[in-house]
Image (cartoon, rainbow, N blue to C red):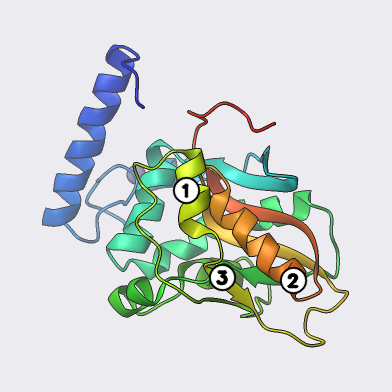
Amino acid sequence: MERFDGWAAVRRRARDALAEVVSLVFPDACAGCGQPDAPLCDRCRGMLLPRVTATRAGELPVRSGAVFDGVAARVLRALKEDGRTGLARALAPALAAAVAALDAPGAVVVPVPSSRAALRRRGYRVAELLARRAGLAPVRALRSVRTVADQRGLGRAQRRANVAGSLRAVRGNVLDGRDVVIVDDVVTTGATLAEAARALRAAGARVVGAATVAATPRRWPAPR
Ligand SMILES: [Zn+2]
């Protein structure tokens, strides 16, 4: 999937690898660049200031506060894989800006649930934690009803098939007839968000859109 895009990419990959090694030696080093002084240096914090982009998951409007690349990708990875939950605060403005861009005041905010395996491994729910730090009041209205394979390395259609029917929403007046905004950490093809929207609509919700901290730079053709 990845194409060679010159020496800038080589340098970027070398920097990513270096930052990873440094983070192993100094677990509290800057999650964005590996500088050993602070969990997140001022420069990297500045790189996380929200810049909202728009995409779609099927018909569902999706807004994201950052591009899943460079600093944002490394900080999100440190939050998800290294247990550095303190970083959620620095990522929260990107999510808050994405939610605000959907312009759905009063909507119920529903995070995409972590898989049972991920929850066991981490001990916290990533999307829900980010939503709380963004000053939202997330409602745990979705649960995963079956295990899905790792989405990495799968194409758009495979991802959709992989997650189909994997989520279920609570029924009853929590969602019935209510406007709902789905929140998650990252959108790639939007397959998970589309599945979340399907499950919420099945429970009577009016899904207005989805908001994520970051969007993966597009390597797939736009959906029609
Ligand atoms: Zn830094």
Q: Foreground: 192 or 181?
A: 192
Report the residue that reaches farthest toward the top: 6
Indicate the amino acid at tag 1: Arg
Q: Earlier in the sequence, mark 1 or mark 2?
A: 1
Which residue is label 2 attached to?
Answer: 202
Q: Residues within 10 Å of mark 1 (few under 14, many from 20)?
A: many
> Does dot 2 land on a helix, a strand or a loop?
helix
Which residue is label 1 attached to?
Answer: 159
Residue at screen point 58% across, 47% down: 190
Estimate the spatial distance between the alpha carbons at disc 1 and disc 3, rounded to whole Å.
14 Å
Which residue is label 3 attached to?
Answer: 167
Report the residue that reaches farthest toward the left: 25
Residue at screen point 47% across, 64% down: 88
Question: CB under 8 Å between callouts 2 and 3?
Answer: no
Residue at screen point 24% across, 61% down: 28
204 above or below 216?
Answer: below
Q: Residues within 10 Å of mark 3 (few under 14, many from 20)?
A: many
Q: Is residue 86 left or right of residue 81?
A: right
Q: Earlier in the sequence, mark 1 or mark 3?
A: 1
